[in-house]
Image (spheres, rainbow, N blue to C red):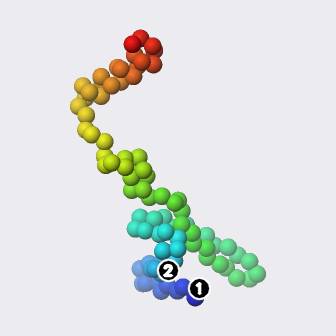
Amino acid sequence: MALAQSKVTAQGQISVPAEIRRRLGIVPGSILEWDVESGEGRDKIVVRRNGKYTFKDIHRALYPNGPPKRRSLAELKDGIRQYILEKRGRL
């Protein structure tokens, strides 16, 4: 693979090359970690993706069929009451 390059803007921003984004699975919202390693008289910057999953990935895993159905306060309280009764063995 050819060496990928980025140019730093006046605001200190860089663009991550498309090949690197694809290879590391970097999408909007991904967090990158930066680390400076010193050795042999030279400093080296290591950039790596932090965390494998975004909030949207986790939400899709928890709710594959979309968000759960909205419930009223009375329905929530009734569900809690049922759970406690079942847990205590009084049903």
In the figure, 36 relative to 79: above or below?
below
* On-image quarter of the N terminus: bottom right
- Marker disc for residue 84: none
Which percent across, then down, holds residue 90? 41, 11
Residue 14 seen in the figure: no
Q: Residues within 10 Å of mark 2 (few under 14, many from 20)?
A: few
Instruction: Kindly report the distance in space between the C-alpha atoms of the residues bearing marks 2 and 1.
Output: 10 Å
Mark 2 residue type: Glu
Determine crowd level at label 1: few under 14, some 14-19, many 20+ residues with C-alpha closer than 10 A. Answer: few
Residue at 53% from the left image edge and 70% from the top image edge? 24
Which is more toward the observer, 4 or 10? 4
Nearer to me, 1 or 49: 1
- Secondary element under disc 2, as helix, strand or loop, is helix
Which residue in the protein does label 1 denote?
Answer: 1
Give amino acid for label 1: Met
Judging from the image, what secondary structure is the residue with disc 1 in? loop
Whether residue 14 sits left or right of residue 68 in the image: it is: right
* Residue occupied by mark 2: 19
Query: Residue at coordinates 46% horizontally, 80% vertically from top-left?
Result: 18
Cβ atoms at labels 2 and 1 below 8 Å apart: yes
Q: Is residue 76 left or right of residue 6?
A: left
Give the percent coordinates (x, y) of residue 89. Answer: 45, 13
